[in-house]
Amino acid sequence: MLDAALFELQHVVDVLLPRYEELAAAAGRSNGPRAGTEEQQLLRALFQRTPCVVALLDPDTVVRRLNFAGTILFGMRAGYATGRPLTGSLAPEVRAAFRSQVAAVARNEGDRSMAVRLLRTPEGPGEPLRATMTALRPPQEPGNAVLTVFHTGGGAFPAHDMLSGNRTWREDEHPVNHTEHQRDCAAAPPARRTVPPARRVPDTPRRVSRAHLAEVTQGAELLDLLDDTTTALLSGPPAGPAADPGTPPASVERAVRVLAGRFADWVVLDEAAPAEKPDPDGHAHGALRRTLVLGPKEDDALAAALAGQDPADCPLVDNAARTGSRALQARPDDMAAFGHDEKGAHFLARAAVTSLLCVPLREPDGPVRGVLTLFRTGARRAFSLAEAGVVDRLSRHLGLALRDTRP
């Protein structure tokens, strides 16, 4: 994923950015000094610094712009939010209604206002908000955008702290230099991007980027996690065939238990029975069986329901076992991805899952021997790419352990 992202960024720098600069220069020559530049800079600064939460959305609720207040309320940076549906930050039961209202406003059917609820907030469970929507026609664009203002109450979002610079950042956040960012945004030409384009300065040395303390701390924590899980795998008696196929091998269970609570709120382990011959897709795994479910102690009923679920009825797990592909969902939008219980309630909605990781357990160039699924719920931050990389390494270790302990 990182290689693909770097390739796309290099394509932007080598191809798209020069073309953009040519178009901007041509527009400047044809129009001469642009009138109203100061007014545009003022409006841009007002949009970014207003204490109200303001988002500019496409008819499909995709974020085009999000101001500073919105980044704090929704718990994500503006660059991450741009290009993603805002419904991923809302509770599942209001997403469909919010999509329909935004689409209606974009069709010039009048302004709308509705109550929504966040999936989570920096202070705990999501609370009701008032979303007010109005159509807006951006210049030189054929269709409408939807300007949405979210009204908060009860001090759920301390906007004055952000504006005064007294904002206390959590360890998992990266602080933003608002003054520098505001100056860059004000100087940038109007475009459909939140971050202004980089400028090429010949013969100018690049400024060396230094890792923030939060990044260093997270890296050390992930290294400790990988060390603890590896130690759990290697500790104890030598590996041997497990006696009970309904329970995981002791070494695998010790390693998986390290993740419970500390790294994820829910841990689900599914193992594949040995297959007599590869399936038509070439994967030599048999039927899946659920061998371990770890979750909060106060939710034993949900744990029992997950333990009784047939992994074949779980699309996410079944796809990982068949194709060997990994899944990282920062804000799951499809509540049916992990199946449902006997009453038809979706497990992701019932557990209030806000982020998930699903990785196949396989040795290098070997068959899939199981699937490990991790859930985070409530106000806990979403899984990052760095954390997904650590779990991917751990999955290979677990795959080797299952090869040595399962016939």
Image (cartoon, rainbow, N blue to C red):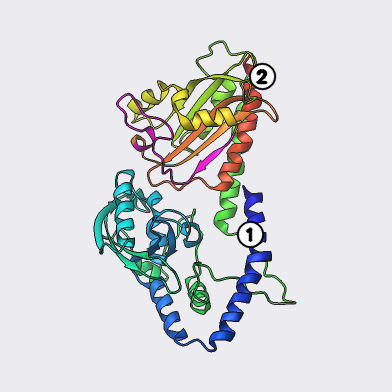
Query: Going by the picture, which residue comes out furthest to the front?
Result: 142
Instruction: Please say whether residue 234 is visible from this viewpoint.
Output: no
Horizontal arrangement in the rendering, residue 238 relative to residue 56 (left or right): right
Q: Which mark is residue 9?
A: 1
- The question of residue 108 being in magenta is answered with no
Residue 245 appears at what percent x and percent y? 53, 13
Residue 133 appears at what percent x and percent y? 29, 63
What residue do we see at 44% from left, 80% from top? 40
Query: Going by the picture, which residue comes out furthest to the top?
Result: 243
Residue 126 appears at what percent x and percent y? 31, 49
Foreground residue, 42 or 177? 42
Q: Which residue is mark 2?
A: 404
- The question of residue 344 being in magenta is answered with yes
Q: Are marks 2 and 1 in contact (CB under 8 Å)?
A: no
The magenta stretch is 325-349
Give neighbour class at mark 1: few <14, some 14-19, many 20+ (Cα, 10 Å): few
Residue 328 appears at what percent x and percent y? 52, 42
Figure quadrant of the C terminus? top right
Looking at marks 2 and 1 on the same chain, the residue that comes earlier in the sequence is marked by: 1
Kindly report the secondary structure that dominates the magenta region of the rendered protein.
Answer: loop
Give the number of callouts.
2
Q: Gap in Å between the C-alphas at discs 2 and 1? A: 42 Å
Instruction: Please say whether residue 380 is visible from this viewpoint.
Output: yes
Q: Which amino acid is tagged 1?
A: Leu
Relative to 397, residue 41 above or below: below
Relative to 321, residue 75 above or below: below
Q: Which amino acid is tagged 2?
A: Asp
Classify residue 45 by image quadrant.
bottom left
Foreground residue, 296 or 101? 101
| Closer to viewer: mark 2 or mark 1 | 1
Classify residue 369 by image quadrant.
top right
